[in-house]
Amino acid sequence: MRLSPTFLIAVLTIGCSTSPASVESPFTGDPWPEIRAERIATLLPGAMAENNLDAWVVICRENNNDPLADHVGCENAGGTAAFMFFREDDSVTSVAISPRGEATSLAETGRMDEVITSERGASIWNTMADVFERFGPLTIGINTGRSPITDGLTHTQYTSMMDGLPSKWTSRMTSSEAMIRSWLSVKTPTEVEIMALAAEITAQWEVEAYANAVGGETTDRDIADFLEAKMEEIGVGDAWSPEQNPAVNSGKDRGHSHPTDRVIQPGDFIQTDFGIRVHDRWVTDIQRFAYVLAPGETEAPQDALDKWEAAKRGNRAAYAAMMPGATGNEVDRAQRLVLEENGSQPVMWGTGHPVGYWAHDSGPGLSGGRLGQELRVVPTQVLKAGMTFSFDGFHKWSLSDSTTKTISVEEMVVITEEGARWMTPPQEDLILIPTPSN
């Protein structure tokens, strides 16, 4: 199907650039090593104390490394290596046990407080036991858990460690899952600044994509192509699977799915769910909605505007509820009350999720607030300053063919001591796409 001339020129201009570097990227350099050191020094002690851990151990290896390897500095492990963190009041002491070769690099970078060299191929468990004897931790966190992020130990590594260490230490080991969630969910001010800039660019590109669309001509795939060209232009990556990023849908609900060649039509709500990865580390997750006008229309009909405003009210109710000390299910409940008041059909998705290192990051889910059920509060659900979220405002209705359509106003925020703060200005009005008269 034919693209609008403006849309086609925009895409072709990007495609004809001499190289992606012809447009300067705001995401140059590698801020991660410095930020990682800050996170370990300032955030890890509190997360360990909050979850009653005296020590935390990450076992690293080559090729199939622990998901948290590059969060602690063992991303270059060759043979089996142990990165150990011992809490002492408001600080941590870090000790690495690393095979010869990698140990040299670790010592030179100064990444760890102490580096112990193990002979290549030798067991590290006796050395670990000696380190434990020095620090005497009563509780030791290891990377086992229900989420892929926290379940880093392989079965073979776990059994080898259990067999190789004295029971004096293995009996003190427990899952580090809750501690990892506490640590990862809070971002430093520098990280928030990076994410806010990325969020601003994400939203801006979505608006630009709609500005180049024409009813009856542009396809969902065309809009996705525009955004993919923008990503290539400044050299950023996908926040999730490239096949489904961006997810552009002008028809019935399709969930998380790829864009199709469907031509946008008058009366369509267009949903674009899009995220970018910057510095190969931090991601965004933002949706923008547009409405396709009929030929001659200059405003959306009142029914369409009512649906949009209903979804936006749900989003803003969730926003108001996102305070330090609130729980994820309380935020979800605030939005579901608005859903019911506005006559929306129920939605199966939670209101929101943490976002940061992954589109669905570690931290409290904004869910569990369905009407008619008790709100059960657990410590891992509590919102804290520094946490970052993507969250929706929903409104769902039936289409004439018995399928459904859902507006999901998705925005990004950081939690501050005063409450939620937008990462980038939220969408207030439906974006309107014209359809030319025949």
Image (cartoon, helix red, strand yellow):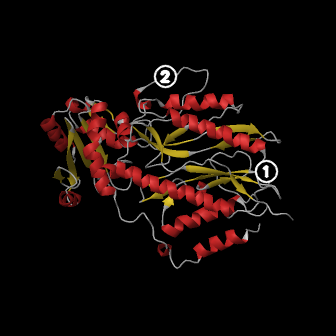
Instruction: Give the structural element (helix, strand or loop) at label 2.
Output: loop
Q: Position of residue 390 (x, y in %)?
A: 52, 44
Q: Quadrant of residue 135?
A: top left
Of the 4 image quadrants, the one containing the C terminus is bottom right
Q: Position of residue 178 (x, y in %)?
A: 37, 34
Which residue is pictured at 63% across the width and 71% down the height? 10
In the image, is residue 207 above or below residue 380? below
In the image, is residue 1 above or below residue 325? below
Work out whether mark 1 precedes mark 2 in sequence or the reverse, and give the earlier one: 1
Q: Mark 1 touching mark 2, by CB under 8 A?
A: no
Q: Position of residue 236 (x, y in %)?
A: 48, 63
Which residue is label 1 attached to? 267
Query: Callout 2 environment at 10 Å: few (<14), some (14 to 19), or many (20+)?
Result: few
Which residue is pictured at 42% across the width and 59% down the height? 280
Which labelled disc corresponds to residue 77? none
Report the number of numbered marks: 2
Q: Furthest residue to the bottom?
A: 18
Which residue is pictured at 66% across the width and 62% down the height? 211
Which residue is pictured at 60% across the width and 56% down the height? 246
* Residue 1 in view: yes
Q: Position of residue 192 (x, y in %)?
A: 40, 49
* Residue 65 in view: no
Which residue is label 2 attached to? 376
Of the 4 image quadrants, the one containing the N terminus is bottom right
Question: What whole-number distance in Å separates the C-alpha atoms at marks 1 and 2?
Answer: 41 Å
Amino acid at pointer 1: Gly
Instruction: Give the structural element (helix, strand or loop) at label 1.
Output: loop
Select label 1 or label 2 by which is in front.
1
Query: Callout 1 environment at 10 Å: few (<14), some (14 to 19), or many (20+)?
Result: some
Q: Furthest residue to the right?
A: 438
Q: Nearer the viewer, residue 87 or 121?
A: 87
Amino acid at pointer 2: Arg
